[in-house]
Structure formats: C-alpha cells, structure tokens
Image (tube, helix red, strand yellow):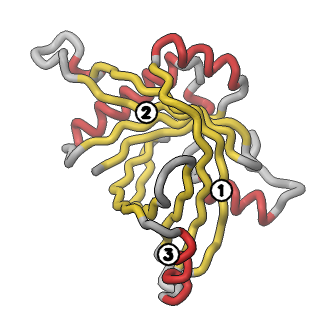
Amino acid sequence: MTEIELKARVKSPAETEAKLRKFCTFQGETVKKDEYWRNPAGKTLRLRIETGKEPLVTWKIKSINNGVETNDEREFHVSSAGLFSELLRETGFLPVLKKEKRTKTFSVSCPSPGLRGGPHQDKTFQASMELSDVTGLGFFLEIEIVLDNPDGETEKEAGAALRELLAQAGVPESEIEERYYSELLALKEANPLKSNVAK
C-alpha cells in the first residue's frame, strides 16, 4: 500500500476540531506510543503501542514533494512488544527515539479534484484526518489517503485532495510541516533551550 499524506501545525486545535466535525465523521480517540529503532546499517523501523490494539511494526520508504509525503509502507502486528524489542536488540537494533501523541481521528470521502465534471467525476478518495497533540511538539493535523498500487497521476490527484481538505479544516498551507516527527524530536532533544522546532 502507498500512503499519500501531509501534516500541518495547528494553532487553534479547538477551532480546527469544530470544523472537522462539520464535514467529517468522528472515529474515536486514541493514544499512540512509538519507539524508533535503528541498526548499524542505518535501517529504521517503528514499534507502535496503541490503545486497544496489538503492537504494530512499521517500516517505510519515504519521499516528500512540495509538502506531500509519499510512503511505500510495510507493517505487521506482533503479540508482544517486549519480546519483539528483545529480538531487535539481539539483531543489532537499538532504540533511538520515542514519540507519544494523543489523537482524535476523523474520516471523510472527497472527490478527486482533477476529475470533477469529467467522465469519472464519481471517483472519490477515502481520507483519514487526525488531530494530534504530539508530546513536546504541539498540535498537528495529519491527512492521509491510502492507495493500492497507484500510478503517478493518481498520486498527484490524491495530493491535491489533501490540500483541499486542509483548506476545509481552516489550516493554511503555510503551516505544512515537511520534516518528520522524528527529525523534529531529535532537533528538540539536541538543543532543548534554543530549538527552532516551533515556528
């Protein structure tokens, strides 16, 4: 599966949530605790503990273009985070970063912007919109569309749909954050007093 997503800083979470509730379906609230592990070759994976779910292991091949992130994602569940962590250490991985976020998740269907009015105007994307309080970094809105083996044109259409949804949520494109959370957290930990993480 390929994820097309973007995230943006949110200055007024209450206002943003109110707008999301007007055009999205609320799916629930959860806490996600992530550990990032890396081996000597530089390969990184994420172990996620989420409320009410089995631990999830994810690794991604990432790229960012004009604020829109494309991820070729692989993931699987494990029955025990503790045992899997032991396996990681035995195979040369070490924990390098932790992240926690409290998330309210919404879903919405949106038409493909480039297809409106055309012969396939009924084509829609299913998007997930997450309003998250990331510990140490503040509030963000993450918008994601998951596609199955998309071509380049479909990826562009999905990226355009993400920007339209961002506008509907009342968040300006100037607030799009292209850096990964792991980069922002590492930057803050390296220089906690003079961090340029916050805009």
Label 3 near label 1: C-beta < 8 Å? no
Residue located beneath label 1 in the image: 99
Nearer to us of marks 1 and 3 is 3
Q: Position of residue 190 (x, y in %)?
A: 78, 66
Left or right position of 91 against 174: left
Using a 10 Å C-alpha cutoff, classify the residue at mark 2 as few (fewer than 14 neighbours), some (14 to 19) or many (20 or more): many
Left or right position of 71 against 99: left
User: Amino acid under label 1?
Assistant: Lys
Q: Is 108 located above or below residue 96 in the figure?
A: above
Q: Position of residue 8 (x, y in %)?
A: 59, 35
Q: Position of residue 98 (x, y in %)?
A: 66, 62
Quick one: 10 or 90, which is closer to the camera? 90
User: Amino acid under label 3?
Assistant: Phe
Task: Return the residue found at the far left.
Answer: 119
Q: Is 26 located above or below residue 144 in the figure?
A: above
Q: Quadrant of residue 184?
A: bottom right
Q: Residue at x 49, y 60 (%)?
A: 55
| Mark toward the start of the polypeptide (3 vs 2) | 3
Q: Secondary structure at mark 1?
A: strand
Using a 10 Å C-alpha cutoff, classify the residue at mark 3 as few (fewer than 14 neighbours), some (14 to 19) or many (20 or more): some
What's the CA distance linking mark 3 and mark 2? 28 Å
Using a 10 Å C-alpha cutoff, classify the residue at mark 1 as few (fewer than 14 neighbours), some (14 to 19) or many (20 or more): some
Q: Residue at x 89, y 56 (%)?
A: 193
Quick one: 36 or 150, which is closer to the camera? 36
Residue located beneath label 2 in the image: 128
Q: Secondary structure at mark 2?
A: strand
Which quarter of the rendered picture does the C terminus lie within?
top right
Quick one: 170 or 52, which is closer to the camera? 52
| Mark toward the start of the polypeptide (1 vs 3) | 3
User: Amino acid under label 2?
Assistant: Ser
What's the CA distance linking mark 2 and mark 1? 20 Å
